[in-house]
Image (spheres, rainbow, N blue to C red):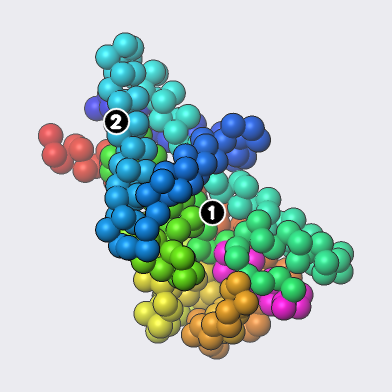
Amino acid sequence: MGADRSYAYGAAAGLLGDLLLGDPQRMHPVAAFGRAAGRVERVLWHDHRGWGALHTLVCAGGATALGVVAARAVRAVCPRTAASAALTAAATWAVVGGTSLAREASAVGGALERGDLAAARARLPHLCGRDPEALDADAIARAVVESVAENTSDAVVGALVWGAAAGVPGLLGFRAVNTLDAMVGHKSPRLRRFGWASARLDDVAGWPGARLTAVLAALAGDDPRGAVRAWRADAHRHPSPNAGPVEASFAGALGVRLGGTLSYGGRIEHRPVLNGTGRPVEVADIGRAVRLSRRVGLLALGVTVAGRLIGRGRGR
């Protein structure tokens, strides 16, 4: 029970640290991992899935192993609950990015409210890879809401799920996999084969967090029935197995219509419409999406901690 208490205290403290402080401004651990993964990529890159799988194994496996070593070292040196809780808190704060997500989304929303489309376009790449110059104010607002939905799962809920399941190694491993997908998991000609393993592993690792995010968005949103209806009707039509349920549930919960035509890196994509009976996204919906994201994150903390305590209790 001591390990479960230390995780519960640590995860709560880490999430509180994110809410109060946001991401570290200097020497961010995730940024350091990204730089290390980039160096490994330069050494290992070949236009081949096998070399990409090795890259994924080295980087994600290394981050997970670091978590194992750190957790064991803390228990060996200082077996008290407080020491393990502090390590969990530090790891949670490092990998959870809900406050930075909210700040970036709110910054774009604020620029749109002021009518400063140029500033909104300049800030949008901090959230997603859309081509901002091709977007008007409403299209930018839609992109922000979609990014808030997807990143609520990737940057908050998914990490909490794996932390509850595997402690500090789960927290670090999940963030490593998600970061690798962002770095090499897209379908550019150079990375189509090399990034395949990272993209597929991210799909697997993100599966439970995405479903929990969709459930909690339905529970915490303004229209639970609409969220469930949109999830059931439209999620499977999205090209991403994890973004589909999350974005559809957010769309139904907020009563808006997501999806449609978008542009990535000069490439036009025609995404399916999610919650087609909803209204078009407006600038004011950015703030509503941010508030829903925060509620989902807090609920996810409670659900995952409770799940860990109940699961370990039954196991004993």
Name the residue located 61 percent from the left edge and 52 percent from the top edge: 101
Depth check: give the residue in front, 155 or 250.
Answer: 155
Q: Give the range drawn in magenta.
A: 134-147
Q: In this view, does 26 lie to the left or right of 304?
A: right
Check disc 2 and report the residue beneath it: 68
Circle nearer the viewer, 2 or 1: 2
Residue 152 location (% of width, % of height): 51, 57
Number of other residues with Cα within 10 Å of mark 1, as a class: few under 14, some 14 to 19, many 20 or more: some
Q: Is residue 91 left or right of residue 260?
A: left
Residue 192: name its quadrant: bottom left
| Residue 272 sits above or below residue 113 on the image | below
Sequence-first disc among 2 and 1: 2
User: Looking at numbered disc 1 in the image, what kind of residue is underneath it?
Assistant: Arg
Name the residue located 31 percent from the left edge and 11 percent from the top edge: 77
Check disc 1 and report the residue beneath it: 295
| Residue 245 sits above or below residue 105 on the image | below
Residue 145: name its quadrant: bottom right
* The residue positioned farthest toward the left in the image shown: 316
On whether residue 188 falls in the magenta region, the answer is no
Can residue 210 be seen by looking at this rendering? no
